[in-house]
């Protein structure tokens, strides 16, 4: 049975920044006849426990694209340094006690079930102020890649740390094989200890507004991961492991891969 709409309004806000360092104008690239951002928007709307979906952008072309599609869009400041900061600007105008979902604009294959699971976790426990998602890793290259963020959690499923480095570090196995790369090649089961952090966040509105007013922290600036700001300020982030694979479009290779999937599935 699909999850029901909560008494608390659950609102997805998709940050859609125009600038992209590795793939220019990626959110407006065509996928099966429509811009990439519209696929993300439509997937988010399919989540059964979501009431509204809003795109937050700093670009007129993206604004007009969303407006022409008949969906909600808000023009935000171009000075925001993170997606959460952009979303907070929109959250200021939303109802008190709302649940705010941050869905990355460059994930046109985002699963509605992933959104539903992350939202359900925060709705079922009033003490949780923020949730996020992770998935298993299957490729040793991803463990070693700084572009793939790894996450470790405590025994209760709360985040201990996020890093671009391979965490945890299997010391004894690496000693045996010389390097982590060798260890992963010689012992394929080793990859099972790693989890990829996927960029979906769910916040209680009041926590989001508080969190985004904190100064950027040293770890956040070092790793360039905004969620570390929350951890460094004592926040507990519940991590929900999902089985649906998320593919963010950061490079031309990512785009071609997603394009092939969407065209094959006729999404």
Image (cartoon, grey):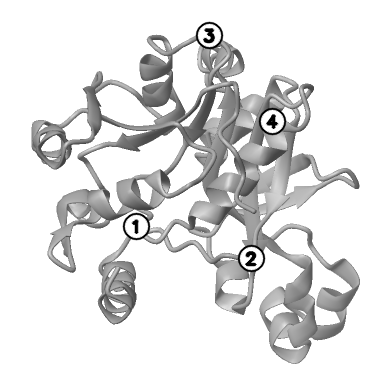
Q: Nearer the viewer, mark 4 or mark 1?
A: 4
Q: Residue tagged by mark 4? A: 123
Q: Nearer the viewer, mark 1 or mark 3?
A: 3
On residue 243, the disc is: 2
Q: Residue at x 80, y 84 (%)?
A: 177
Rounded to the nearest angstrom, the CA distance separating label 4 from label 3 is 15 Å
Rounded to the nearest angstrom, the CA distance separating label 3 from label 2 is 32 Å
Q: Nearer the viewer, mark 4 or mark 2?
A: 4
Q: Residue tagged by mark 1? A: 108
Q: Is residue 129 left or right of residue 114?
A: right
Secondary structure at numbered mark 4: helix
Locate residue 184, reporting x and y percent: 71, 81
Q: Residue at x 69, y 25 (%)?
A: 232
Q: Is residue 257 above or below residue 156?
A: below
On residue 96, the disc is: 3
Locate residue 112, reporting x and y percent: 49, 53
Rounded to the nearest angstrom, the CA distance separating label 1 from label 3 is 29 Å
Secondary structure at numbered mark 1: loop
Graded by Cα atoms within 10 Å as few (under 14), some (14 to 19) or many (20 or more), the crowding at tag 2 reads few
Nearest to N terminus: mark 4 or mark 1: 1
Q: Residue at x 45, y 31 (%)?
A: 51
Q: Nearer the viewer, residue 260 or 264?
A: 264
Residue 219 seen by the camera: no
């Amino acid at each position: 049975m699909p999850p029901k709409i909560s008494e608390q309004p659950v609102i997805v806000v998709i940050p859609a920044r125009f600038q992209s360092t590795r793939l220019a104008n990626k959110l407006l690239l065509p996928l099966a006849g429509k811009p990439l951002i519209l696929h993300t928007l439509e997937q988010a709307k399919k989540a059964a426990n979501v009431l509204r979906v809003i795109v937050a952008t700093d670009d007129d072309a993206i604004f007009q694209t969303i407006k022409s599609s008949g969906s909600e869009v808000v023009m935000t400041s171009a000075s925001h340094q993170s997606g959460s900061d952009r979303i907070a600007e929109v959250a200021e105008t939303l109802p008190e006690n709302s649940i705010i979902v941050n869905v990355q604009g460059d994930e046109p294959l985002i699963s509605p079930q992933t959104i539903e699971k992350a939202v359900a976790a925060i709705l079922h426990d009033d003490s949780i102020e923020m949730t996020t998602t992770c998935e298993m890793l299957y490729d040793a290259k991803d463990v070693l890649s700084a572009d793939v963020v790894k996450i470790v959690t405590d025994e209760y499923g709360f985040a201990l740390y996020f890093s671009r480095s391979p965490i945890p570090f299997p010391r004894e196995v690496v000693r045996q094989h010389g390097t982590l790369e060798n260890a992963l090649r010689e012992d394929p089961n080793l990859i099972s200890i790693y989890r990829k952090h996927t960029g979906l966040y769910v916040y209680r509105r009041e926590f989001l507004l508080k969190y985004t007013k904190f100064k950027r922290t040293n770890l956040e600036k070092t790793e360039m991961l905004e969620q570390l700001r929350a951890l460094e300020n004592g926040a507990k982030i519940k991590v929900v492991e999902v089985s649906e694979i998320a593919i963010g479009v950061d490079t031309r290779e990512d785009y071609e891969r997603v394009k092939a999937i969407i065209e094959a599935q006729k999404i």
